[in-house]
Image (tube, grey):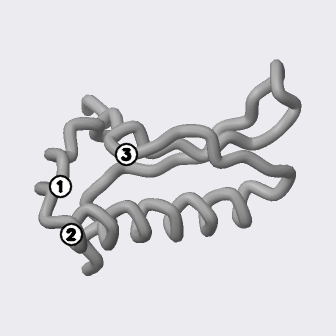
Amino acid sequence: MKTSDQYHKWVDWSENDQAYLGKCPDFITGVHGDDPRQVYSELCDVAEEVVRHLESIGRPLPPSRIRPMQEVG
């Protein structure tokens, strides 16, 4: 598992923007595009770049605070 995998990432359709928006709130927002798979792929790449950058400058990674909702059953 890559370090960036511990951070929750998702893609939503935005009616306002008429585009898919990729989100990783612990790091970034604003990845967008027309193809949800491509947006998710780019979002994962950006999250990995953020991890590498923070590690390269000796800055600690933020805790992964955003978690997906769990089904109650």
Measured Cα–Cα span from mark 2 to mark 3: 14 Å
Q: Earlier in the sequence, mark 2 or mark 3?
A: 3
Residue 31 higher or lower than 38, as above or below = above
Residue highlighted by disc 3: 27
Three-letter code for the amino acid on which mark 3 is drawn? Phe
Name the element at disc 1.
loop
Q: Residue at x 56, y 58 (%)?
A: 43
Q: Camera-side residue: 8 or 73? A: 8
Q: Quadrant of the N terminus?
A: bottom left
Q: Quadrant of residue 37?
A: bottom right
Measured Cα–Cα span from mark 2 to mark 1: 8 Å
Q: Quadrant of the C terminus?
A: top left
Name the element at disc 3.
loop
Three-letter code for the amino acid on which mark 1 is drawn? Leu
User: Mark 2 packing: few (<14 Cα in 10 Å), some, or many (20+)?
Assistant: few
Q: Earlier in the sequence, mark 1 or mark 3?
A: 3
Q: Residue at x 29, y 37 (%)?
A: 66
Which numbered dot is residue 61? 1
x and y percent of residue 6 in the render?
Answer: 25, 60
Q: Quadrant of residue 26?
A: top left
Q: Residue at x 82, y 39 (%)?
A: 19
Residue most extreme to the bottom: 1
Residue highlighted by disc 2: 55
Three-letter code for the amino acid on which mark 2 is drawn? Glu
Is 14 placed left or right of 61 in the picture? right
Q: Camera-side residue: 45 or 7? A: 45
Q: Residue at x 43, y 61 (%)?
A: 47
